[in-house]
Image: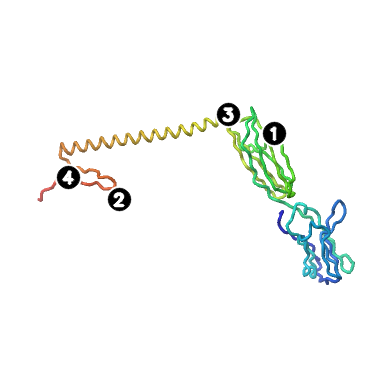
Amino acid sequence: MVGSDVELSCVDSQENTFSLNELFVYWQISVTGKPKTVTYYLSGNGSAGHDDNQYKGRAELSLDGMKRGDFSLRLYNVTPQDEQKFNCLVFRNLERVLNVVVTLHVAANYSMPKVSTPQDQDEELTFTCRSTDGYPRPNVYWINRTDNSLLSKALHNSSVSLNSRGLYDVVSVLRVPRTPNLDVGCCIENVLLHQNLTVSSQAETGTSTGTKSSITESGGTAREGKSNALVAVLVLGLVAVALAVGWACRSQRLPCRRYAGAQAVRPELELTGSCREPVVPPS
């Protein structure tokens, strides 16, 4: 992964031990068909170095490892430019004992795609999808989310460019005929990472947007009206019951209780006024 560290393996399978005084070790890459040294170790003066500033401070050999036959290259802060074949050459007393080629593949995650609000142009809708800082070059797909089918490549145009970090930025523009409730998705595929990033965008065209908004508002008003009407009916009903009970208490001297309101702990019916429970004489 870009920015990470990696070890390129070059190990003597015979498990021999080596003296640093008899070793010559080279790690090379091929540039325009010519070998270019990444780092090296020369016996005698025990020198190590780099032929290219691109790898200065980023490529390292382990002296202790080489004594055990491990000539692996430690590469720090991997960049997209490091994606190539590395050749490990090891000589002991000028006799070649190892010749290993390691292919390094480099990858970087793309940012989550962002799809802009669709632009309405006459009978056509335009969607723009953007994703940045990925590697390697991506595949771009547009999907009809209604049935998850791929939209024709003829409907979209994708532009991929390298940025200052050596990573890819992609912009894809989709143009489709205006369709009510159109739901599309933009998919950025990183083949090397087996990764698909998909973001959906839904467009409501014609009068659908206005209709939806008015339905929401009207629905709220209707519900409020029904609630108010229900409260009014309940209040009128309670008043009617109270009047009927009061009339019964006074005309027939029936036992009655009056509601004294909600109490702090529990609601109770309080006995007040002249309406009380009738006294039962002792037997």
Q: Nearer the viewer, residue 249 or 58?
A: 58
Q: Which residue is mark 4?
A: 276
Packing grade of label 2 (10 A; few <14, some 14-19, many >=20) is: few
Secondary element at tag 3: loop
- Residue 69 horizontal/vertical position (percent): 80, 68
Earlier in the chain: of badge 2 and badge 4, it is 2
Circle 3 residue: 206
Disc 4 crowd, CA 10 A, few/some/many (<14, 14-19, 20+): some
Is the Cβ of the residue at disc 1 closer than 8 Å to that at disc 4? Answer: no
Q: How far apart are labels 4 and 3 at the CA level? A: 70 Å
Residue 236 position within the rendered picture, expressed as x and y whole percent measured from the top left = 29, 34
Per the image, the residue denoted by label 1 is 155
Task: Report the quarter where the N terminus lies.
Answer: bottom right
- Near-viewer residue (165 or 156): 165
- Please report the residue visible at 72 percent of the width from the left and 53 percent of the height from the top: 2
Per the model, the C-alpha gap separating discs 3 and 1 is 21 Å
Which sits earlier in the primary sequence, circle 1 or circle 2? 1
- Residue hosting label 2: 264
Q: Position of residue 112 (x, y in %)?
A: 64, 46
**Type of amino acid under label 4:** Arg
Question: Residue 137 appears in which quarter of the rendering?
Answer: top right
Give whichever of discs 1 and 4 has the lower sequence position: 1
Q: Is residue 254 left or right of residue 161?
A: left
Q: On the picture, is 110 further left or further right than 275?
A: right
Q: Amino acid at mark 3?
A: Gly
